[in-house]
Image: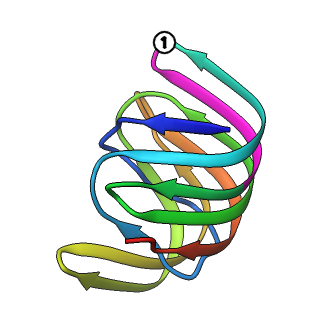
Amino acid sequence: MDVLLADVYMIVAFTAMEVLLADVYRILAFTAMEVTWRDVNMMVAFTAMEVIWTDVCIILAFTAMEVTWRDVYMMVTFAIVEVTWRDGYMIIAVTAVVVTWIDVYIMLAFAAVEYQDIC
C-alpha cells in the first residue's frame, strides 16, 4: 500500500544506520495490517518493508510495531549515535525507543533494519 503524507513534520524512532531529513512530502510503501484515519489522526499497525520519501528522498526498511499520528508537535526519546550535516540536511544514526508527537503529534515504536537515501 502507498500512503502519501503532505506534512511538514517527520521523525523516526528506530535502530538504523542513518536518516536523511530533506523536504516536506513523504510516501510510505509498506505492507499494512491495519490503517485507521480519524480527523487529524492516523493509526498504522504494519510490517514495513520500506518507506520512500520523494522530494525528500528517504527509504526505510523496517519492522514497525505501531504508529500513531495525533497533532502537530514532537517529542523524541532516543540515543543519538551520530549526527552529520550535509547540504543543510541532517543525517542521524540513532537507537530509539519511542517518538511521541502530542497534540498533532506522532508516536512510533518499531525497529528499523535499513535506511537508504534515494536522492
Please state the horizontal and vertical placement of residue 22, each as a whole percent of the image.
Answer: 29, 62
Please state the horizontal and vertical placement of residue 62, each as a whole percent of the image.
Answer: 70, 63
Q: How many marks?
A: 1
52 left or right, relative to 22: right
Q: What residue sits 48% from the left and 36% below the top? A: 4
Taking depth in this image into account, of 39 and 61 the one nearest to the observer is 61
Secondary structure of residue under mark 1: loop
Q: How is the image coloured?
A: rainbow
3 left or right, relative to 109: left
Query: Mark 1: which amino acid?
Result: Asp
Displayed quadrant of residue 119? bottom left
Range of magenta residues: 39-48
**Mark 1 Cα within 10 Å, few/some/many (few <14, many 20+)?**
few
Q: What residue sits 45% from the left and 71% below the top? A: 118
53 left or right, relative to 61: left
The quadrant the N terminus occupies is top right
Q: What residue sits 60% from the left and 76% below the top? A: 16
Displayed quadrant of residue 8? top left
Furthest residue toward top: 39
Please state the horizontal and vertical placement of residue 58, each as a whole percent of the image.
Answer: 46, 64
Placement of 2 over or under 29, stated as above or below: above
Taking depth in this image into account, of 92 and 31 the one nearest to the observer is 31
Magenta span dominant secondary structure: strand
Please state the horizontal and vertical placement of residue 94, each as a whole percent of the image.
Answer: 53, 76
85 within the magenta span: no
- The residue to which callout 1 is attached is 39
44 within the magenta span: yes
Q: What residue sits 69% from the left and 48% below the top? A: 30
